[in-house]
Amino acid sequence: MTSPPILLRLLFVLNPISGDIDKTELEDTISTFCAERGRSAAFFHTSGNDDFAKLKQYISQQSYDAVFAAGGDGTVSLVASVLAGTKLPLGILPLGSGNGLSKDLGIPQDQQEALRLIWDHQVRAIDTLRVGDTFCAHLADLGFNALVVERFCSGDTRGPGAYVRIAMQEYLGYEPAVYRITTDRETYEGAAFMVTVANANTFGSNVVINPDSRVDDGEFEICLIEPFPGTAALGILYQLYTDAFDESVYTKRLRCRHATIEVPGHEEALVQVDGEPQQAQLPLQVTIEPRSLRMLLPLTT
Ligand SMILES: Nc1ncnc2c1ncn2[C@@H]1O[C@H](COP(=O)(O)OP(=O)(O)OP(=O)(O)O)[C@@H](O)[C@H]1O
């Protein structure tokens, strides 16, 4: 077995606002940590404006051995979209409010522990998705959660409390849409409370939407929660937190390699992709790029 190459030149892509976390001392901490171990650290700060093109150009002009995303799921998705299809591995320094993909991949949530991956890691290639025109590394959805994420992102308050408050407000008047989903294996047609396109398993909130699936199997899942009576809500919530998604009569999963999602009578729909809400054109095509993203992961996952 050949040992993985030693990573000496590291780029950290830092989102100054993610997770409402104060990062004033972060650069010094990382630089010192790297220098003490014979590594060099450079920093790219996201601006929230055209970061994909800026980062892509920046990386193409430099020479690094690995790139760390220091932020939340949106930052991870941004860096992953730039690195997908290249040999450059992606590390994650989880500094968001949810940190869904890093939790899913068993990446330590503690800063010092996550930084240890610089020298103590395995490199594993994972699948990535395209949801319409948008790159997706983790989870995307239409329906109820997309609406809550959109309200959450446009509000002033962050954190799990704000998410739950918005979810409760929106739940009362929510009207599920009707979807037609055509995959390479089957067709589903019916109303759904939410439709999640899942490369991985678990939301940053620890809701397990897609248990027992792999991020490197060349397939993804469409996880449906159908409309349910109010009396079933707590039971479904319990199942979502206990790895029991399939045990409800209101849930369904379609495993596939390609899917077309339509909302009959609509030309566009609100979609959240890796935590970022947007309006997407319908029909929405979902495709997979098997093992297209090289990740720095702990040796034990
Ligand atoms: N300098 C900046 N100023 C304002 N917004 C920024 C800046 N840099 C990035 N952003 C925005 O930050 C968002 C991504 O944040 P990210 O998902 O990393 O953190 P989070 O939302 O706190 O965490 P999580 O997604 O894990 O809950 C994107 O919408 C991006 O446009």
Image (tube, rainbow, N blue to C red):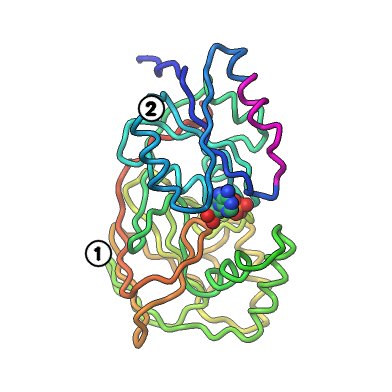
- Between 94 and 298, which is closer to the camera in this rendering? 94
Identify whether 156 is placed above or below 292. below
Badge 2, how many Cα within 10 Å: few under 14, some, many 20+?
Answer: few
Q: Which residue is mark 2?
A: 62
Q: Is residue 140 toward the left or the right of residue 87 in the image?
A: right
Identify whether 146 is placed above or below 268. above
- Between 191 and 108, which is closer to the camera in this rendering? 108
Residue 271 colored in magenta in the image: no
The range drawn in magenta is 21-32
Residue depicted at 52% across the width and 52% down the height: 48
Q: Which residue is mark 1?
A: 184
Quadrant for the N terminus, please: top left
Q: Is residue 68 visible?
A: yes
Badge 1, how many Cα within 10 Å: few under 14, some, many 20+?
Answer: few
**Distance from label 2 to label 1 (Cα)?**
41 Å
Please tell me how many numbered marks the rendered image carries: 2
Residue 29 colored in magenta in the image: yes
Residue depicted at 57% across the width and 55% down the height: 203
Inspect the image, locate mark 2, and give the three-letter code of the amino acid beneath it: Gln
Q: Is residue 73 visible?
A: no
Q: Earlier in the sequence, mark 2 or mark 1?
A: 2
Secondary structure found at label 2: loop
Could you say where residue 135 lies in the image, as x and y percent from the top left? 38, 54
Inspect the image, locate mark 1, and give the three-letter code of the amino acid beneath it: Asp
Could you say where residue 76 lies in the image, as x and y percent from the top left? 50, 45
Residue at the limit of the structure toward the left, as seen here: 184
Could you say where residue 258 lies in the image, as x and y percent from the top left? 28, 61
Q: Is residue 267 toward the left or the right of residue 119 in the image?
A: left
Q: Is residue 258 toward the left or the right of residue 160 in the image?
A: left
Identify whether 127 is placed above or below 139. above
Could you say where residue 153 lies in the image, as x and y percent from the top left? 60, 64
